[in-house]
Amino acid sequence: MLWIGSIAVLLVHAVPPPSGDWAFDVVRLRNGTEFRGLISGESDKEIRFTVVRRSPGRPTVCLPTTFRKSELETISRLSATERTELADRLRDIADSTKSGQTREQTLELVKEKGDWLRYQSGQFVLRSDASSEVVRRAAVRLEQIYAAYDRYFPVRRPGAPPTTITIFRNREEYDALLRAEKRTFANRAFYEPATRRIVAASDLDRFGADLEKVRLEHKQLRADLDKQEAALEKLYKAPELLRHVQPIRDTRRRIEQADRQNELAFDQSNRRLFATLYHEAFHAYADAFVYPAEETPLPRWLHEGLAQVFESAIVEGGELRVGHADAQRLAQAKSLARKKQLPSLQDLLQSGPKHFSTQLPTDAQEADAYYLAAWVYAHWLTFDRRVTGTRAFSDYLSDLKQGRDPIAAFAALAGQLPVQVEQSVEQFLLKLQPDGTVADLSTLPGGR
């Protein structure tokens, strides 16, 4: 039997919250972003945190994440009584999603003309003609990545119009749109700043029927198991009861295991789609909510570099994680760096749209090198220097807007001389591992 179930619960649809204000643990990052929620675990180096978002008229959203203590500025902690009260409330919310009622099933989708469905979020509107099961999954993933954007780049223009994200269920429909709009590129997606829209092609139609079928099977099976266990509880008492209910509980665990395997299968099958969406959505988010073109826009190299950082985000252990280094991209960047073929800091900072264009076959090699260099420097700024989204980062963009020399402005942001920046980035790149950690070169095969 094909088991295809829902992914781990990352966002939950709450029962109506009680009246009155909720008290939260509050963490404030060095870049100024503030998060409210519940500290669920703590070590010397990091804090496990459940971000809680409550908006009028919308379900409560819970986002599990991890903060390194090195990126925190302050922590405001709940009292013991307040902590117990909040934990109980979040437990009630989680309980309301049991028996297969995960966030994907409780998202509110609006039917449009034909087979189209729409999901409205605060910062994007998702439209798709794929099955409802797949649209729900896509909506959850987009909510997660927008939360990640907000963590590293706090919203500065909360009233900006949302981006419309249209996902066609197959490539044929997408190609028909390109022909109708007289577009000739071969990309599987595009972002159009003037209309605040992202349009993407997918293979979602071949997943929809199976996902919907097995979701219903899982729901019915769990309901049957609940009834069987309830009936047994009336007939037997411990320890005899355990012998009779153990097979039921084993079946539930097998269903949960199958669901986790399907999460991985879904990720692998749609990896390219979500990487593309995360990339284009970062462009849209930055343009609309943080660094608009008319104020302090991101330079093209940095726009592309940061978009690549976020496109490789993954769902792991019930949490969307950003910060690891895509293994293939990392290997290519290291290879070019060792051969001294990565663009220099000066070339990168003075680059423009043409350096990232692949309109001609001969452009591909140069564009690839610039994309890799942009990714390396963006990764370094975000996870080593930890300056993206900070006041210093905004000052850097303001300096560029006012015509300051881009090399001098970047050196000021990095807190190093230009020659030191290149040396630091080279060392960071050569030590960087796919999991995002930085290794001691002396411990690696072949040393440097």
Image (tube, rainbow, N blue to C red):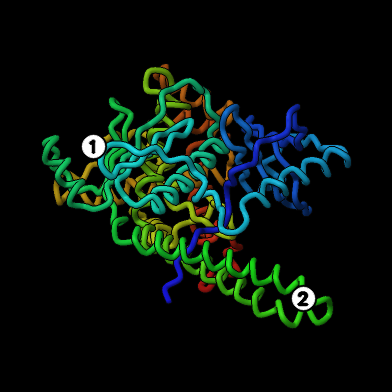
* Picture quadrant where residue 38 is located: top right
Q: State how many labels appear.
A: 2
Give x and y (percent) for residue 344.
37, 44
- The amino acid beneath tag 1 is Lys
Residue placed under numbered mark 1 in the picture: 354
Q: Residue furthest right?
A: 80
Residue at x-position 59% and y-position 46%: 12
Q: 216 and 107: which one is in front?
A: 216
* Picture quadrant where residue 296 is located: top left
- The amino acid beneath tag 2 is Leu
How busy is the neighbourhood of tag 2: few (under 14 within 10 Å), some, or many (20 plus)? Answer: few
Q: Is residue 338 visible?
A: no
Give x and y (percent) for residue 154.
55, 31
Q: Can residue 201 be seen in this view?
A: yes
**Is 386 above or below relative to 170?**
above
Of helix, strand and loop, which one carries label 2? helix
Q: 19 and 52: which one is in front?
A: 19
How busy is the neighbourhood of tag 1: few (under 14 within 10 Å), some, or many (20 plus)? Answer: few
Is residue 329 found left or right of 51 in the rendered image? left
Residue placed under numbered mark 2 in the picture: 235
**Is 112 above or below relative to 45?**
above
**Is 438 above or below relative to 257?**
above
Give x and y (percent) for residue 182.
11, 36
Give x and y (percent) for residue 52.
66, 39
Residue at x-position 41% and y-position 20%: 401
Is residue 285 found left or right of 383 in the rendered image? left
Marks 1 and 2 sit apart, C-alpha to C-alpha, by: 75 Å
Viewport quadrant of the N terminus = bottom left
